[in-house]
Amino acid sequence: MSTSATIEGSVEQRSATLNSRSVWIAIAIAFTLRFGWVLLSRSYHFSHPDHFDFGQEIGALAYSLATGHGFSSPFLVPSGPSTWIAPVYPFALALVFKVFGVYTTASAIVMLAINCACSALTCWPIWNIATVVTNRRIAQIAIWLWALLPPFMAWSVFWVWDAAATTLLLTWIVWLTIRLSRKVSLRQWIGFGVLWGFAALLNPSLLSLLPFTVAYIAWKSRSRREPWFAPALLCCAVAVLTVTPWLIRNYMAFGKFVFIRGNFWAEMRYGNSPYGDGTWMGYVHPETNMYERQKLVDLGELRYFDSKKQEVMAFIREYPWYFRQLCFRRVLFYWWDFRDITGSTPEILQTIARRTFSTLALVGVVFLWIRRREAAALITAILVVYPLPYYLTYPYGRYRHVLEPLLLICALYCLSQVKEFKTFFNADERG
């Protein structure tokens, strides 16, 4: 080996080490800021008399598990077995309850610390995706913006919910999809299927993206003339096998097939009515409406969900044009926070910032195609498909948070295409 090749290899290795170190520094700072915010804001203190503001439905399910009543009663009143929420996060919270006490300050601190860790660790897949899809300069900026900006912290600081964990998992899946599209073994196909099964048990909404990630890897494998059909089929079968124990539990609990989470029609009802504006109608939710809560108790979950389905279908039949209008409004709400901004100056500035961020991100997707960047098709499919259920039900900040790592990368890539910014964003990339 020549001296120049040896020096070049040494430089590349040193650069990789420095990059890895900078990512871990960003992760450490991200966690410190998030958990520091938890402690300073005392977000681990929950004030509701029955502690329902501690994780809402997830907290209630964890309470039932920790007290020996099984996966049941998502509103702290006995209502029987439940499929209101997917099982992974409630079981994790129940384990924390077992160790640190039910609805204690210690449990709240531990769960929020876990959320903060998930949010901070998202820096790692952001770095890897941005490095491959754009360049290292954009990757560096992306992880530091994710680490430092409060809007990317809030869901891990104030909510005992799966938002941070789901965001980490989806971002990691996107990175693995890109990585496996370059070279994939049968063992990796199987492992990918197990990971997807776990993702489904954490948040079934992610399952809408499974076909696109598997298809992307299979498409790249086919272009290399490698086996793809049977391994892809095996991957999907492994994902199904991973969730099967929970499906068996549901069948045993309800006497019929129920998917991982069965409350779709209830969520549809909470976003659709002649008096709705496209957002969540909390006044008809069992969380706030005592009549609805009692109806849930009297009917049981499956019959309650059936009643919500009948109400939704009746609304759509009677007001088809208004339903379509609500769906269109939800698209605008999801991406551009479309509403009157007549509040205080900080609220107006935050709304303008969110709208600008979304616009830059979506334009950045277009530039990914124009510049023929790797994984442009994969990222586009995710951004198009994942929000679809929320256009039918209702948009909410944590549903959008799951996509924000990808949106951040796309927004920065959009800025990198502006002539005045090219030197700054493309320092290690020509062309």
Image (tube, rainbow, N blue to C red):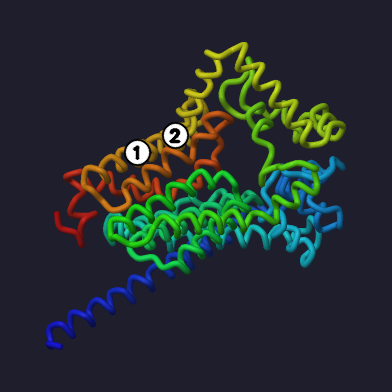
> Relative to residue 37, is residue 61 drawn left or right?
right
Mark 2 neighbour density, 10 Å: few (under 14) some (14–19) many (20 or more): some
Q: Earlier in the sequence, mark 2 or mark 1?
A: 2
Q: Secondary structure at mark 2?
A: helix
Q: Position of residue 370 (x, y in %)?
A: 22, 42
The residue under label 1 is which amino acid type?
Answer: Leu
Q: Position of residue 329 (x, y in %)?
A: 49, 23
Q: Report the residue at 77% width, 61% height from top.
A: 97
Q: Quadrant of residue 312?
A: top right
Q: Position of residue 259 (x, y in %)?
A: 67, 44
The residue under label 2 is which amino acid type?
Answer: Trp
For the residues labelled 2 and 1, say whether their Cβ atoms are less than 8 Å apart: yes
**Circle 2 residue:** 335
Give 82 or 419, whichever is nearer the viewer: 82
Q: Report the residue at 66% width, 46% height from top.
A: 260
Q: Secondary structure at mark 1?
A: helix
Picture quarter with the C terminus: bottom left
> Relative to residue 334, is residue 76 drawn left or right?
right
Give 215 or 109, whichever is nearer the viewer: 215
Picture layout, residue 199 above or below residue 296 = below
**Circle 1 residue:** 362
Picture layout, residue 27 above or below residue 64 = below
